[in-house]
Amino acid sequence: MFIITVIPIEKGPFGESLTYFYPKDIPIGYIVSAPLRSRNINAIVVGNEEILNAKTDIKNADFTLKKITKVIGESPFSSDFFLTCEKMGIYTTSNTGSIIRNMIPVDILENLEEIKRKEKIISEEEIKDIKQEKLIFQSPKEDRIAFYKTLIREAFAKKESVFICMPTKYDIEIFESELKKGIEQYVFSFHSDIKKKKLINDFNKCISIDHPILIIGTGKFLFIDRNDIKTMILEHESSESYKQFIRPYLDIRGFVESLSFHKKTKLIIGDEILRPETLWRHEEKEFGEISSPIFRLPEIENRILVDMKEEIIDKTNKKFAVLGEETIKTIEKALTSQKSVFLFSVRKGLAPITICYDCGNTLLCPSCDTPIVLYNVKNKENKDSKMRIFMCNKCGKKEKTEIRCPKCNSWNLTPLGIGTERVEEEIKNLFPKINIYLFDKESVNGDKEAKEKIEKFKKEKSAILIGTELVFSYLDKKIGDSVVVSFDGLMSIPSFNMTQKIIHIIEKLNNITENNLIIQTRNSDNPLLKQILAGNVLPLYRQEIKERKDYNYPPFKRLIKITFQGTKQENEKARSFLNNILGGYDPQIFSAFIGKQKGEYVTNTIIRIEPKLWQIPNTKNNIISIHLRDSLLKLPPSFSINIDPEDLL
């Protein structure tokens, strides 16, 4: 008789491990079916012990052990994958089971009996002397694809397979169409839209085919294992889609790096412009390179810069225009030529700028020249009342609302928010007979509706699409003209990654625009805008690294974000509790950027620590601060913990 310890691998509120008994020994790594409450769940065996050795513990237990229902068989997941899940569970302050459930599609977990088993595992002894190679590849997409074509064919000649990890289905389709030419029967793509039957069939083919293969998939398919995978490529590394926005807030990029380390595969990290954190690690000799990084963006040939400072449609009431005269004329010309137009804006409620009604000047942060935003915050002297302050979303500097316009010394300052809804209202007034498609998270309900709306828009000969970054995940066809409704609004994105986000937004707009790319701004002298239009990214990277060092942002500090949501009284108690638990780590506790969600108040806490105290598991002896992790684990489930957050507000 044996005591069997398992980790559930199905969706559900499970702990780290559960204990059962079974008449025979079950090897570690096997999949079993076990009873839990009123049903059976699939789980992976992580421990086994003869009942004679565990008798004392069993006698002292205040519960009765249940029997394993069924032994399904050997796990289709490699020990390297399982070890990576275990390490990332520690890194994210969650657990192994939670990572497994987030990294494997439900259709696989619920149909394990149909899944073929992996090949013989390569022993650690066989790969212990292999030195892993980690390389960056910052180059235009066309150059990267050309290099990958050569790399794949050379790998095939050496009887080696390649895995390319992509952030979205859209990215997969673009790269697959180019890379599969001539080797179609050996290319397998995997993403969330694949139906169960095809998914299981393709997975089994991947495992059984003798010829080397190319796998192109999103992060949820990194569990697919072959002994001949010797190269892993992390493509479009800067994409926000790699970071999960639900617990355990796993970053797929860290998972790929950790998995490639444990598998001892070559790792290539590619993008047009890599994240500053990654480029800095390259400078620090953590990464080698395929070739010297290229810090130039493709030239924006047909760009139109529209200065909106003097654009006022109601001089009596000082009402500022959403679209400039030149923009309107360009849109009219496109529609007359039966071309469609895309108006890019931020979503409702985000990124307002602050302008002077008397001279039209945009107020900038005195520390970093970023537009400042008007906030309602708690009054420290009177907790029941609110006070208004100006704050910079990039460096966090705060200013009292009593400040004057630095250009004309006027007090007449006001926030100007130009979200998708306001743009839609303006377009309806200007072009009442044109079909308008609004495309943001508020107007599109789910993936299916998003695809249907984009397909309908693509069939139009002349229509207007108004949307946010969400559009980039669905629009796979070039359109006539594109408009950045407010570049200054982009500068107020509540994130320390603001510069990187803006660069990629302009880059994506340029890629999908056939004719004119119009950029509207009230600050045409903006250094960031000038460098982007010139296509020169290196000075921006240098400035970004300097600012990140000054403000204690990554890569110089590891950030941990803790969020609590509840009533006003519960938030007050939460703040006190956080100070007691984490006081030694100098926590910054404040109301969230959107301070109230679904009727509940939201409190954020930020901790900054040295990266060496909380290391990505990409080395044999990676370090995680035991004291800090134990402190974080004392927080109840009502507190969400996000390691390496994308934003702080």
Image: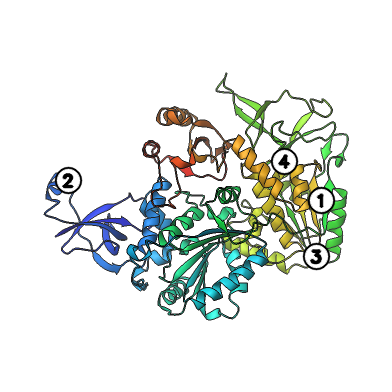
Whole-angstrom CA distance, mark 4 to mark 3, is: 28 Å
Check contact, mark 4 vs mark 2: CB within 8 A: no
- Mark toward the start of the polypeptide (4 vs 2): 2
Whole-angstrom CA distance, mark 2 to mark 3, is: 73 Å
Check contact, mark 1 vs mark 4: CB within 8 A: no
Check contact, mark 2 vs mark 1: CB within 8 A: no
Question: Which label was assigned to residue 429?
Answer: 1
Mark 1: secondary structure: helix
Mark 3: secondary structure: loop
Question: Which label was assigned to residue 339?
Answer: 3
Mark 2 vs mark 1, foreground winner is 2
Mark 2: secondary structure: loop
Res 552 → quadrant: top right
- Mark toward the start of the polypeptide (2 vs 1): 2
Mark 1 vs mark 4, foreground winner is 4
Q: Residue beneath label 4, please? A: 417
Query: Of the residues shown, which amino acid type is indicated by label 3?
Result: Lys
Whole-angstrom CA distance, mark 1 to mark 3, is: 20 Å
Q: Name the image colouring.
A: rainbow
